[in-house]
């Protein structure tokens, strides 16, 4: 007989905004939005405090829409270095209860207390409340905690009792608590999957748990069976205690990308190419840092008026980690997909490298000396990488950045958002 596990999922509420309120007492109790600069960019709401959310502000909402919903909102720019520090401080608190702490992005962690709960009194709910109180008193932020026997239902619990909530889901109450919830509330059931499930008459998590497995596999492939097991509470994945660097080295990196909401309207080909080069440089720099090369390069843009996105990709003749090759391919893809001459304007631009392979390996030389030139370019890229590592990302800039003041303020490495680590890593 298997021992029933004791899994916590701790989620820091409105994380970015809560950190700003913790750092700046004058913001506490006020509607705070962490997002872009209203005067210089068409940014979005990254996080809103609960005071702002109660007034109708939503995550990913355009700033002008958020301002319309909450005129008194205080909008502050994101400070990712600060958020990463708070994330590490939270992990330090969690680690005093168990050595099995798994990050799921900056603001979320799973904790496995199966074999350490007895050291802290033996009552899971009391320990969860203690952790919550410590986070409030020591860091100045609130957390919601889900307690269950598996990671999926623990996360469901923390998601459904916010802010500063506590929910326990057991095998005895799971059908009554989890199954009536909309199927979209289950981890890895996104909007597209929700629509496909709706066509099968599946609207709740309970519907998914009891659905025909053959129909799910036919509609969603293997992932259909995976999410059905999630709905049934059959998740046996362990809580893995790995640092951020260990995650980077152990997980399979499938792609490297970067994107930005541009602080002005991109309405001509020249500016679009310049922004792509900024993003592409960042992507190529990260490829070299990981010792990878990409066979496929993609570029995407979002329309200023409709917010519709378009993306294209191309497979290169040979894998590359050269800035020049990544940026040329990406910029050609982007400008070929938008008609600036007839009024197209872009709000955001992204570059992605995929189909990755190890960069080190045998190289086929050629009679024309092209491979020799590629090696020289690679050495130049690595020299620039070293300078930026030592003196900051702004120590070396392209001429196009210096001739356009709007571009010189952009730093794709500094402004890169940390995304959640994959559950399936």
Image (tube, helix red, strand yellow):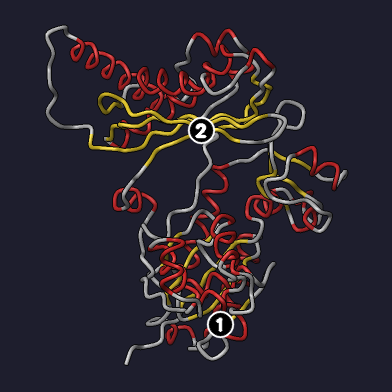
Mark 2 surroundings: few (<14), some (14-19) or many (≥20) residues within 10 A = some
Mark 1 surroundings: few (<14), some (14-19) or many (≥20) residues within 10 A = many
Helix, strand or loop at disc 2?
strand
- Residue 378 location, x and y as percent? 27, 19
The label number, if any, that marks residue 213 in the structure image? none
Disc 1: which residue: 169
Which quarter of the rendering shows the C terminus? bottom left
Image point (69%, 29%), residue name: 304
The quadrant holding residue 198 is bottom right
Image point (52%, 37%), residue name: 416
Image point (79%, 44%), residue name: 66
Q: Is residue 349 above or below residue 372?
A: below
Identify which residue, 143 or 150, lies in the foreground: 150
- Residue 329 location, x and y as percent? 40, 21
Distance from Cα at disc 1 to Cα at disc 2:
41 Å
The quadrant holding residue 82 is top right
**Of the image marks 1 and 2, the number of the one nearer the N terminus:** 1
Image point (64%, 74%), residue name: 181
Q: Is residue 232 above or below residue 39?
A: below
Disc 2: which residue: 311
Which quarter of the rendering shows the N terminus? bottom left
Residue 244 is left or right of residue 166, and the answer is left
Q: Is residue 318 above or below residue 306?
A: above
| Camera-side mark, 1 or 2 | 2
- Residue 322 location, x and y as percent? 32, 22
- Residue 57 location, x and y as percent? 78, 51
Residue 50 is left or right of residue 261, and the answer is right
**What is the total number of numbered labels drawn onto the structure image?**
2
């Amino acid at each position: 007989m298997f021992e029933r596990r004791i899994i916590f999922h701790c989620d820091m509420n409105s994380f970015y905004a809560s950190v700003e309120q913790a750092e700046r007492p004058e913001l506490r109790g006020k509607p705070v939005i962490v997002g872009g600069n209203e005067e210089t960019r068409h940014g979005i709401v990254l996080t809103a405090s609960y005071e702002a959310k109660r007034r109708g502000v939503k995550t990913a909402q355009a700033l002008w829409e958020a301002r319309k919903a909450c005129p008194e909102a205080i909008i502050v720019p994101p400070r990712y270095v600060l958020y990463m520090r708070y994330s590490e401080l939270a992990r330090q608190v969690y680690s005093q209860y168990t050595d099995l702490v798994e990050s799921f992005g900056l603001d979320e962690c799973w904790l496995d207390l199966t074999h350490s709960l007895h050291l802290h009194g033996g009552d899971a709910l009391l320990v969860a409340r203690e952790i919550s109180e410590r986070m409030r008193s020591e860091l100045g932020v609130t957390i919601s905690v889900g307690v269950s026997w598996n990671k999926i239902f623990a996360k469901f619990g923390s998601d459904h009792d916010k802010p500063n909530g506590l929910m326990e889901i057991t095998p005895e109450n799971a059908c009554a608590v989890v199954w009536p919830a909309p199927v979209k509330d289950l981890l890895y059931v996104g909007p597209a999957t929700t629509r496909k499930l709706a066509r099968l008459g599946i609207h709740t998590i309970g519907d998914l748990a009891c659905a025909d497995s053959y129909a799910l596999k036919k509609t969603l492939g293997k992932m259909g069976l995976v999410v059905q097991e999630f709905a049934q509470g059959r998740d046996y994945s362990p809580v893995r205690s790995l640092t951020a660097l260990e995650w980077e080295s152990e997980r399979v990196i499938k792609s490297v990308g970067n994107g930005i909401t541009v602080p002005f309207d991109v309405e001509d080909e020249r500016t679009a190419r310049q922004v792509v080069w900024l993003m592409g440089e960042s992507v190529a720099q990260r490829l070299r840092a990981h010792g990878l090369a990409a066979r496929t390069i993609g570029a995407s843009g979002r329309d200023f008026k409709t917010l519709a996105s378009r993306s294209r990709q191309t497979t290169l003749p040979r894998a590359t980690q050269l800035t020049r090759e990544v940026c040329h391919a990406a910029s050609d893809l982007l400008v070929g997909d938008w008609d600036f001459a007839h009024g197209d304007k872009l709000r955001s631009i992204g570059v992605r490298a995929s189909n990755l392979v190890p960069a080190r390996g045998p190289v086929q030389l050629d009679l024309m000396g092209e491979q020799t030139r590629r090696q020289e370019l690679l050495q130049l890229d690595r020299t620039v990488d070293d300078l930026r590592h030592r003196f900051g990302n702004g120590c070396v800039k392209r001429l196009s950045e210096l001739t356009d003041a709007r571009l010189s303020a952009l730093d794709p490495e500094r402004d890169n958002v940390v995304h959640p680590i994959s559950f399936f890593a």
